[in-house]
Every structure is written in C-alpha cells, then in structure tokens.
Image (tube, grey):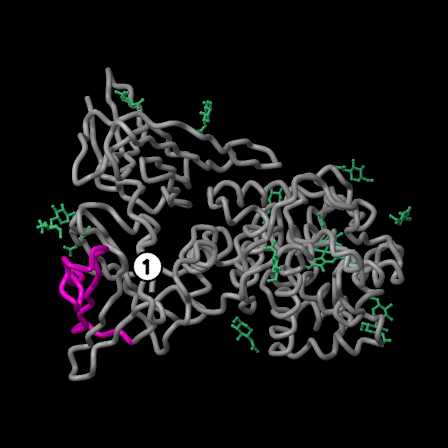
Amino acid sequence: MKLCSQPLFAPVLIVCALGGLVQSFSTFQWPNPLLSYADQQLYEGPLEVLAEGCPPRDNSTIPAQWLRIAYHDMSTHNVDDGTGGLDASIQYELDRSQNVGEGMLDSLNDFNGFGIVSPFFGMADVIALGAVLAVAGCGGPFVPFSAGRVDATEAGPPTVPEPQQDLASHTESFRRQGFTPTEMIALVACGHTLGGVRQVDFPLVVTDNSTILQTFDTTPAFDTAVVSEYLQNTTQNPLVVGPNVTTRSDFRIFSSDGNVTMQSLLSPANFNQTCSSLFERMLNTVPSNVNLTDPITEPFDYLVMNNNPSRTVTLLWADRQESFCPSSGCSQQSNGTQNVFFTIIGQMQGVTALRYQFNATINATSSISKFWFEVNENDGSEPIVVDNGGAGFVVEQDSVFVDVARSELVLVESGGEFDEFIKLVVAVRGDGASTSASVTSFSPSLSGNPPFTPTINTTDLQLDASNPPEGGYTFFTMNTTFLVTFLDVTGTSSSGTVTQKNFDMTANNFPFVLIS
Ligand code: HEM
Ligand SMILES: *[C@@H]1O[C@H](CO)[C@@H](O)[C@H](O)[C@H]1NC(C)=O
Ligand SMILES: *[C@@H]1O[C@H](CO)[C@@H](O)[C@H](O)[C@H]1NC(C)=O
Ligand SMILES: *[C@@H]1O[C@H](CO)[C@@H](O)[C@H](O)[C@H]1NC(C)=O
Ligand SMILES: *[C@@H]1O[C@H](CO)[C@@H](O)[C@H](O)[C@H]1NC(C)=O
Ligand SMILES: *[C@@H]1O[C@H](CO)[C@@H](O)[C@H](O)[C@H]1NC(C)=O
Ligand SMILES: *[C@@H]1O[C@H](CO)[C@@H](O)[C@H](O)[C@H]1NC(C)=O
Ligand SMILES: *[C@@H]1O[C@H](CO)[C@@H](O)[C@H](O)[C@H]1NC(C)=O
Ligand SMILES: *[C@@H]1O[C@H](CO)[C@@H](O)[C@H](O)[C@H]1NC(C)=O
Ligand SMILES: *[C@@H]1O[C@H](CO)[C@@H](O)[C@H](O)[C@H]1NC(C)=O
Ligand SMILES: *[C@@H]1O[C@H](CO)[C@@H](O)[C@H](O)[C@H]1NC(C)=O
Ligand SMILES: *[C@@H]1O[C@H](CO)[C@@H](O)[C@H](O)[C@H]1NC(C)=O
Ligand SMILES: *[C@@H]1O[C@H](CO)[C@@H](O)[C@H](O)[C@H]1NC(C)=O
C-alpha cells in the first residue's frame, strides 16, 4: 500500500492512495519515512532511467561506472576497527590516482542531479541504489537493497586495490574489506562483467593509444562472458592478457585457487546468485556504528492483491473526540485510480499496481486520530481491513501541519518575464496572538562539483493575511523555491511546541495560481 505522503492531515482535505497488486499481505509498519522513501526510490524512483537498457557512455556504460564507484567508495572499510565503508567519502577522494576516470564525476553528477538526496537518504544510499539499478539495468540479478547509510564529511584511507599490486596485497585488501580469498575472486569477476579499462586512465595497462576503452569481456551485459572467455583463453581483458605482466591483476586473482571459483561461476544461475549476495554485502559494508534497514526485496509499501475492477476501497477514520464519527468510523470511498509505473526492479519482479485516490473532508473541530482502509472485492467474500497491523494509521498530532490546500504554486508574469515560487501555508492550532511558526528547509546541492552538500535553512514564517484564522487554526506563510525537497515545520502555541518532520515537497500537488 502506498499511503498518502506525510501531510496526512489537513482541516479540509486529505488525499491518500492505496496500491493494489498480487498475492500476499505486507507486514510493513507505518510510519517509517526511511523505509517508505527507500521503497519508493527503488520501485518508482527516477534514477533508473539512466540504468535501464545498460546505456553506453564514455565508451563504457553508465551502469559500469555506477558499479565501480560503489566498490571504490566501499573500499575504505576496515573490518578490524569497523571504520569506513559505503559512506560517500568518495566525494572527497576523487583526486587520488586509484579513483581516476571521468565515470566517477559523471556518476556523482547523475546521483546529485535527480535531487533525490534527502535528510534521511543521503548520497551513500543513492550510490548503493545506483549499483542495484546498474546490475538490473544490464540484465543482471536483483540485489536486495537496504537504506540508512550515513554520509562521511571527509576522505577515508587510500585503500582501493590497484592493478600493479601483487596477489598478497589484494588478498589483504579484500580481507580488510571483509571478504575471503574466494569471495575476492567472485567479486572481481562480478564487477568486471561490466565496462573495461580506459587507455587515458591506465596507459600502462592499455598501451595501444588507438584503443579508447578495452572491455573486460565481449558483451556489455551483466553475464558470465567475463568468466567463460577467461576460461576459454579467448579473453581480451587487459587485466588478464595486457602486455604488461605486472598489471595482470585479474589473471592473478582469477587463477589464485586453480580456477576452481571461476569454473563454478560458469553456471549463469550460480553467477547470478553469487554476484547478488556478494553485491548485497558490498553495498551493506558500512561503518560499524551505522544501522541499515532490513533488505527491501518486494514493493512492501503497497497492499498486495490481484487486479479486480469491481473492487471498492474505502478510507475510514476516527475523530479525536471520539464523538463525531460513527463507531464504525467516518468514511469516504475512493474516487479514482492511477496506474503505478514501476522501475526496472518492479518490472523484473513482474509486479503491477493501481493507486487508489481519495478526497475526504475532515471536520476541523472533531479532527482525526487515525485512519484505515476497507477493501471489498464485491464477490461475496468478506471485506479486508487494512489497518497497519491493527493499530490503524495513527495521526500523531493535529496542531501543526503544512496546509496543502491553502499552499500555492505561484507563477507571476510581468512584462513577459516569469517568476515562480511556492507560497507555503502552515496551519497552527491556536489563536494568532499566541502562535508562531518556523520552517527548516532541505535543498539538494546545486553545485556542479562534489562534495554535494545540501542547503539547510531555517526561516520564521509571517502571519498569512490572505488566510484569516478558521476552524481553530492560525495560518502562517513564506515564499520558497522549487529547490526545496523536504521541510520540518515547527509551530508554537499556548499549549506548546510541535514539529511535523520530513514533509515531502516533491510529492505534493499544490494548487496552481497564475498572477499577471
Ligand atoms: C583487485 C581488485 C580490482 C582492481 C585492481 C580493479 C581494477 C580496475 C581498473 C584498472 C579499471 C579501469 C578503470 C578505468 O579505466 O578508469 C576497473 C574498472 C572497473 N572495475 Fe575494477 N578492479 C578491482 C576490483 C573491482 C571490484 C571488486 C568491482 C566490483 C564492483 C569492480 C568493478 C569495476 C567496474 C564495473 C569497472 C568498469 C568501469 C567502467 O567501465 O567505467 N572492480 N577496475
Ligand atoms: C568512444 O569515444 C569516442 C571519443 O571520446 C567517441 O567519439 C565515440 O563516439 C565513443 N564511442 C562510443 C561507442 O561510445
Ligand atoms: C599514439 O602513439 C603513437 C606511437 O607511440 C604516437 O606517435 C602518437 O602521437 C600517439 N597518439 C596520441 C593521440 O597520443
Ligand atoms: C592462452 O593463450 C595464450 C596466448 O593468447 C597462450 O600463451 C597460452 O599458452 C594459452 N593457454 C592455454 C592454457 O591455452
Ligand atoms: C608495467 O607496469 C608497472 C606498474 O604500473 C610499471 O612500473 C612498469 O613500468 C610497466 N612496464 C612497462 C614495460 O611498461
Ligand atoms: C586458469 O585458467 C587460465 C585461463 O584458461 C589458464 O591460463 C591458467 O593456466 C589456469 N590455471 C590453472 C591453475 O589451471
Ligand atoms: C540471472 O538473472 C537475470 C535477471 O533476473 C535473469 O534474466 C536470468 O534468467 C538469470 N539467469 C539464471 C540462469 O538464473
Ligand atoms: C544501532 O542499533 C543498535 C542496536 O539496536 C543500537 O544500540 C544503536 O544505538 C543503533 N545506532 C544508531 C546510530 O542508531
Ligand atoms: C479524485 O479526487 C482527486 C483528489 O481530489 C482528484 O485529483 C482526482 O481527479 C479525482 N478522480 C476522479 C476519477 O474523479
Ligand atoms: C475535494 O473535494 C472537495 C469537495 O468534496 C472539492 O471542493 C475539492 O475541490 C476536491 N479537491 C480536489 C483536489 O479535487
Ligand atoms: C464538526 O464537529 C463538531 C464537534 O463534534 C460538531 O459540533 C459540528 O457540527 C461538526 N461540523 C460539521 C460541519 O459536521
Ligand atoms: C537559504 O538562505 C539563504 C540566506 O537567506 C538564501 O540566500 C538561499 O537562497 C536559501 N536557499 C534555499 C535553497 O532556500
Ligand atoms: C511572497 O511573494 C509575494 C509576491 O511577490 C509577496 O506579495 C508576498 O508578500 C511574499 N510573502 C512573504 C511572506 O514574503
């Protein structure tokens, strides 16, 4: 089920949504902003457009670049003291020769460009998501995705393995990163099924300067060609057969156990399974004080069921006073549906979904304490109650919220010039004399170069002259830009200070207003 994004409550309007798909019920507990956001980015996020179909770039592919940056970022991990790992420290490490290649900067620009970095889903989570989408985008296996990484604010140690190092150094590097010698062989093979070595980056590895990039195998896809070509002795992998023996690191690694592991990876099923689980571990290698979410392996933030055009879905809610709504709840039937367009991840899992929309009016005086849904297949079976595991979807407070219906997208036209901004309106329960409001806004970096650090601004709001007090609420306003993606809204009244956290500006269709 895909619930309404955070503004669960407004005195006059609540628009929620519910997705319907195949087979079983989810145990997801709402609210969980990080899990909901991670689920949304994995199954409906915009990043996949650069990975689907394994698109070429810089004589390699975009997914190859995304997979390499994930490995290099993770390479700072030290299993002995629990430091380093996938933490976006790569943003501070780009001047090192081990991180040569324009794919690094290009990838970080891709990741920043979609503006999906949020207060709780930082660049490190985006790098990990990029690797998951990269593998799937080139026809590889699904890699279960966890979120919750913490972004570093400085460089880590220079511990990315390099081709001229010997086998003992590489074995020690991988041990330090948390991988056995056998896992090292497989991880390198799984990584080097994509992309290749650029002559300008490694002129001592690819010595023929008419070659721009020498691929590791003959297919751009995520497949076993890197293994079979190596074992058949037909490989052109420059780290196996390059003219300089010193830099044949893939040969030393692949043959380090008498080719036993490489033989086992000839099986496409084993290659898929091994690469998926090693990549999952690679992406989940984080400093020991960081906790990740459970892996997301299905679109859990949706209610799962078969498609049925005769289904009716009803939104029900209880009022705060427990006197206004009937004991069965106030109710509003869904007034429409929307198709959900899943990413490559949803497509490879074969899931489809419908989103049910609602527009219900809530009495501002009696308010709302929780809501839930009833799904009726209208086929004689008992209606199904969807109530967040029994507790309902609890609306924790109704004292402070972004008023979606009173906020506006404003386009000002003056002499052919256009200026656009968002008029944000915040409702605070209480009267004007004793209330106030402030907003802390989060905007992804606009800089063209890493490190990409977001802008966080705190602003006191003005009383909104165009929205006089109503229903026990006082309205405050500020003008903000489209760059802001998340807000924390704090309101103070005679009964205390309350904050509504993580309001998603991008998920909201504020009414549009043209002024000319
Ligand atoms: C001893 C370990 C490793 C060494 C010495 C090594 C070395 C290299 C080198 C020299 C390149 C060429 C980069 C360029 O031309 O800019 C490369 C590319 C690449 N590596 Fe590794 N690598 C190692 C392990 C891994 C691992 C474990 C992965 C797993 C994700 C990986 C993934 C990649 C990918 C996807 C590329 C292609 C990048 C592109 O085409 O843009 N490598 N590696
Ligand atoms: C390879 O790179 C060269 C020079 O950068 C470019 O002209 C060419 O189009 C690229 N080829 C592919 C297949 O990307
Ligand atoms: C490539 O190498 C040849 C022979 O070493 C040299 O003459 C030529 O200038 C080089 N070309 C480029 C573009 O570096
Ligand atoms: C593999 O090919 C190389 C040259 O490409 C040759 O020197 C070597 O003997 C071959 N090895 C086997 C096992 O066929
Ligand atoms: C081979 O590579 C090593 C390490 O990069 C380098 O020191 C050496 O000069 C190279 N040898 C030749 C012949 O290019
Ligand atoms: C492993 O396979 C490679 C490629 O076919 C071959 O050159 C090498 O001799 C093999 N090593 C062992 C120990 O069998
Ligand atoms: C490997 O995974 C890909 C992507 O899910 C799938 O298309 C392919 O059939 C799998 N291959 C095997 C042998 O499991
Ligand atoms: C991570 O989880 C452990 C165990 O639940 C907890 O003690 C610790 O405080 C958590 N750390 C963070 C940073 O949330
Ligand atoms: C249902 O209501 C929502 C919100 O008011 C609106 O956006 C949508 O167009 C309506 N759908 C139908 C089918 O009337
Ligand atoms: C929601 O319904 C109310 C009346 O029931 C209507 O005035 C309002 O325009 C609707 N909102 C949207 C976004 O459709
Ligand atoms: C809203 O709720 C209050 C308190 O329960 C009630 O007195 C009032 O009649 C309700 N208003 C409407 C329009 O239903
Ligand atoms: C943050 O505040 C500064 C100073 O008031 C302002 O110049 C800037 O435009 C604000 N940035 C955003 C993204 O709101
Ligand atoms: C927002 O912009 C409008 C139009 O420029 C202006 O009239 C209004 O005073 C601004 N509001 C605030 C709170 O600055």
Residue extending farthest top = 415
Q: Position of residue 50 (x, y in %)?
A: 49, 51
Is 349 or 405 nearer to us in this picture?
405
Residue 200 lies, with reference to residue 424, above or below; the image says: below
Which residue is situated farthest in the bottom direction here? 380
Q: Secondary structure at mark 1?
A: strand
Residue 472 location (% of width, % of height): 19, 39
- Residue 350 vertical position relative to residue 206 in the rendered view, above or below: below
Q: Main secondary structure of the magenta part?
A: loop
Numbered range of the magenta stretch: 306-334
Up the image or down, 422 lies above or below 218; here it is: above
Coordinates of residue 451 in the picture (x, y in percent): 62, 36
Residue in front for this viewpoint, 511 or 292? 292
Q: Residue at x 78, y 71 (%)?
A: 233
Residue 336 vs residue 196: left or right? Answer: left
Q: Which residue is depicted at the point 72% across and 41% down?
A: 155
Depth check, front residue: 422 or 464:
464
Dividing the picture into quarters, in which one does residue 132 lie?
bottom right
Q: Which of the image's four quarters has the N terminus? A: bottom left
Residue for badge 1: 394
Which residue is depicted at the point 76% across and 68% down?
A: 185
State the quadrant of the C terminus.
Answer: top left
Q: Is residue 121 highlighted in magenta?
A: no
Say whether residue 113 is left or right of residue 262.
left
Three-letter code, disc 1: Val
- 386 w.r.t. 4: above or below: below
Q: Residue furthest front?
A: 494
Residue 326 is inside the magenta segment: yes
Left or right relative to 197: residue 398 = left
